[in-house]
Amino acid sequence: MSILGIYYYWVFAILLMIGFFAVIAKPNLIKKLIGLSLFQAAVFLLYISMGNVEGASAPIFGFGAETFSNPLPQVLILTAIVVGISTTALGLGIVVRIKEEYGSIEEQEIQEMDRR
Amino acid sequence: MLMAPFVLLLRGRGLPWAAATAASLLAFAIAIRLTVVVTGGEALAYEMGSWPAPYGIELRVDALAVLVLLVVTGASSAALIGGRESMASILSAEREPYFYAAWLLALAGLAGIVVSADAFNIFVFMEISSLASYVLVAGGPDRRALPATFKYLILGTIGATFYLIGVGLIYMMTGTLNFADMELRIQDVADQRPILAAAGFITVGLALKAAIFPLHVWLPNAYTYAPHVVTAFLAACATKVSLYVLLRFDFFVFQQNLTAHAFQFSAFLMPLAILGILVGSAVAMFERNLKRMLAFSSVAQIGYMMLGASLVTATGLTAATLHMFNHALAKGGLFLAIAAVAMVAAGCRLGDISGLARRMPWTFAALVLAGLSLIGVPGTAGFISKWTLINAALELETGGIALVALILVSSLMAVVYVWRIVEAAYFGQPAETGSGRVPAALVIALWGVAIANVVFGLAPELPLTLSAAAADIMLGHVR
């Protein structure tokens, strides 16, 4: 298989790295959370793409389809998406509280305020 | 019996403290009952929804699981019994139900991780417990808890997502999520590279969650600024549960199926463990905030556990699992004592507790007892696990002596930082303090834990048998 033949894995890897970079390098807490969401979304894509079978239909019986995609990864990812949403929601909630307490959502400014 | 974690989930919303404590005690009782059953040598398995194992989700309890389960439920019960007044002083009445609901969710998640035999289920439980513990950590009055929680959330999520990638890669190659099934099917996989990548992702992800040395940055702040009782609970069990998953995954699934994996495992983790022990202890020696000091000491103690595990011998693994149990006793006791101290003292810095031992002799006596156990003085629980660890190190042909020296040096460092607490408390000039009193329940819980430290130091058969059995199970999978 050629390198580009498995392009969906490249999408996964690139998205993963973009998200990871944002989490590490961005000083803004909201941008960090966006990066975290991208990071998780990349993993969701990994699961979904591995469950797919070429030329297969959705795994529903009785419509004349012969081959089915593997439904299990999709079910797993449904759970993981819920987990991801709750994480993002909680993260945003904390950011709101940080903004209330510190008046800023920039990492450096917060650290300086704590040092004083 | 194994449904306990799920019962807890349902009961979480009602009468806040009483329900939480009752549920936690119930879970503790169930854990004790399970211990009795498992000590007989049998592993218990329960098929959720009656679907047979490789297809349905299986719950499984063996000697290793039951040991961690005891720690988790015991720590939660002790912290809840003792923590009522301490929590009431920082929580308003309407927030209390939410707080205890989050507590029970964390407990249920941690217990769920331990009993689950399904890789994806563990991820879900891991996220349940993490999300709940973020809420717990942020619950304190100190605003610095918020950035600490944010950091914990980011790193915790990255750790869990790494774990998820690893599980995904394994699922890709084996088509199963059940541990026992995975172990069999992975042998037929021809191409080892995805499995190796999966091992890497899972190890790093879980190492982040377990705060193994270079990945520990979230831990000190989260422990320092969390409410005191929460720290006692989380310090005693949260990182240990991640470590448990790491050991389970590595020894059950990877070790026998990847060529030379035992060597890679120890070559990767042993230097980190050694550095963690040294750096953690050294920072703790110079730290002036009590909770931060103990948090860094946790980083060092996690190093001991990793050191034991990275030896990949029966004695080493026994030491690692035993130390999980004993460190939970010592550290749980210390943080409970600090919760008690904080009710009287102005703060948690060394200067704040100056001369306090005269006012609260019982609390500080228990603190010293737990501290001795942390150091590893003979007659306390900590001694047993350090002794086992030294034995394991001596079994090595080369470098064993160096490891023993390392353990001794870091124990001396522990003497230094525990002594600094003792010095301040017993010999310092009495500081101006508030008029707070320590509630009786907290003293009772504290002494329960402190006495457990001595009991398991003098009569270590129960944890020793369990952890030896756990080591056998793990090594039984390494051929």
Image (cartoon, coloured by chain):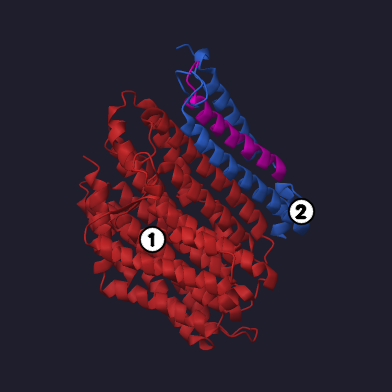
Q: Is residue B148 above or below residue A39?
A: below
Graded by Cα atoms within 10 Å as few (under 14), some (14 to 19) or many (20 or more), the crowding at tag 2 reads some
User: Who's the residue at 68% across and 73% down the image?
Assistant: B93
* Quadrant into which the C terminus of chain B falls: top left
Residue A29 within the magenta-colored segment of the rendering: yes
Q: Which residues are magenta?
A: A28-55
Name the residue at the right extreme.
A103
Residue position marked by numbered label 1 in the rendering: B69
**Chain at numbered mark 2:** A
- Please determine if labels 2 and 1 lie on a single subunit: no
> For residue A44, which quarter of the picture?
top right
Q: Main secondary structure of the magenta part?
A: helix
The mark closer to the camera, 2 or 1, is 1
Chain B visual colour: red
Q: Is residue B257 left or right of residue B204?
A: left
Tell me, for residue A99, which label it has, or none: 2
Q: Amino acid at mark 2?
A: Lys
Which dot marks residue A91?
none
Q: Is residue B412 above or below residue B364?
A: above
Q: Residue at x 54, y 69 (%)?
A: B229
The three-letter amino acid code for the residue at tag 1 is Leu
Residue at image point 32% right, 63% down = B34
Which shade is chain A? Answer: blue
Horizontal and vertical percent position of residue B180: 31, 41
Helix, strand or loop under label 1? helix
